[in-house]
Amino acid sequence: MSCQCAEDRLVLVAVPEAVRRARGFVVTRLRSWGAMGVLDDTLLVASELVTNAARAAGLVALQLRIAGPSLYVEVWDDVPGVPEVRHLVADAEGGRGLLLVEALTTRWGVCRPRAGGKVVWAELPLPADALPPAPEAAAEELADAVLLERVLDALRGW
């Protein structure tokens, strides 16, 4: 990988093809960052988070960010409700998205930015062979909440 830190975002209108566009964005970015080792898990996590947001909101933003040894998938929408992991019966036809996110990530959570809505984020570890050179201490200490605010700053500019 040629960079220590990287980030990019995509703003989507919540229409049926939003998830397909989000998946294309993930492939393009991970390829350009040399992080294809986490492609499959990142595609699934991003698809689940964007699907949930698109079902409830009018506008959705997806941000991918590499900081240190982790890739962050961050999805903003303008709905204040917090997603919850559901405990389902075996024959349920849906509702397993956050269970998959939980299983594939190091951690995930929800941030409520001052501008409104919410950001659902997930952290995926980068494989050792895809890790950038040791990042500066400042990059390692970046707070999740501060970085998530960048998503909203970008949205304010639209």
Image: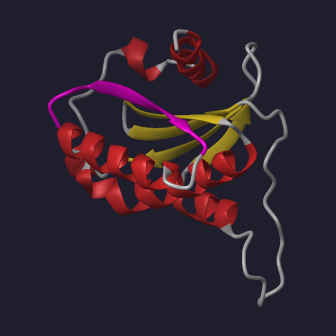
> Between residues 127 and 152, which one lies in front from this camera angle?
152
Q: What kind of secondary structure does the magenta stretch mostly adopt?
A: strand
The image quadrant of residue 152 is: top right
Q: Is residue 31 above or below residue 138?
A: below
What residue do we see at 50% from left, 48% from top? Answer: 18
Magenta residue check for 112: no
Quadrant for the N terminus in the image? top left
Q: Is residue 19 above or below residue 87?
A: above
What residue do we see at 69% from left, 41% from top? Answer: 109
> Between residues 120 and 69, which one lies in front from this camera angle?
120
Q: How many marks?
A: 0
Q: Position of residue 53 (x, y in %)?
A: 67, 45
Q: Position of residue 111 (x, y in %)?
A: 72, 29
What residue do we see at 54% from left, 21% from top? Answer: 151
* Residue found at the very far left of the displayed protein: 2
Q: Which residues are magenta?
A: 1-14
* Residue found at the very far bottom of the displayed protein: 91
Residue 126 seen in this snapshot: no
Q: Position of residue 120 (x, y in %)?
A: 66, 39
